[in-house]
Image (spheres, rainbow, N blue to C red):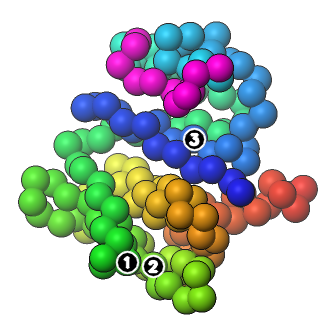
Amino acid sequence: MNVHRTYENEDIVVFWNSEKCFHAKRCVTGSPKTFDPSRRPWIQLGHAENPEVWQAIEQCPSGALGVAYRFGIDVRFEEDRNRSASYEGETQVGECEYQVMDGHWTIAHTGVRPEYEGRGIAKRLVYAVLEAAERRGVEVSATCSYAQRILGDTQSRRDGM
């Protein structure tokens, strides 16, 4: 199963897609305090300054790592509502909704208020659903075009494209 993870501190969020990762170790070389494949979790923010982490991620040749500012936005997985949701304080600014059928989740919609677009929030929302599904051993597909792009990127690598 492909693993999608986010790692956050007060300022940044790091995205990791295991399917794309081939461990060129540029991240480890760029920030050995942050990236250590022998440690679990292998990414630990807070051990190095954010600019060092950001620079190491930009050296990732596979695109397995990504980084974005948090902008004070929190993302919560809300299983009872079949979604992940993003909040600025208590104001909801985005959501990623999924449907459950026969033990399978299908991401049906991902959206962020227009004034919050372009901040990586939608990606955080999709990753929150993917992480929750992985913890539960559930397969995920998508009818949502944005989530399809995230999942399709992984699929195209598997298909050799």
To which residue does mark 3 refer?
16
Does 47 appear in magenta? yes
Binning the other alpha carbons within 10 Å of mark 3 as few (below 14), some (14 to 19) or many (20 upward) gives: many
The residue sitting at 37% across, 77% down in the picture is 82
> Where residue 82 is drawn, which disc sits there?
1
Residue stretch in magenta: 38-48
- For badge 3, the amino acid type reads Trp
Closest to the observer: 132 or 83?
132
The secondary structure that dominates the magenta segment is: loop
Question: Disc 1 and disc 2: Cα gap in Å?
Answer: 6 Å
Image location of residue 120, percent across then percent down: 40, 50
Name the N-terminal-most of marks 1 and 2. Answer: 1
Q: Assess whether mark 2 and mark 1 are in contact (beta carbons under 8 angstroms).
A: yes
The residue sitting at 54% across, 78% down in the picture is 105
To which residue does mark 2 refer?
98
Question: Disc 3 and disc 1: Cα gap in Å?
Answer: 23 Å
In the rendered structure, the answer to whether residue 93 lies left or right of residue 50 reads left
Is residue 118 something one can see in this rendering? no
Question: Disc 3 and disc 2: Cα gap in Å?
Answer: 21 Å
Image location of residue 30, percent across then percent down: 58, 12
Is residue 16 something one can see in this rendering? yes
Query: Above or below — where is 80 with respect to 120?
Result: below
- For badge 2, the amino acid type reads Tyr
The residue sitting at 36% across, 55% down in the picture is 121
In the rendered structure, the answer to whether residue 115 lies left or right of residue 3 reads left
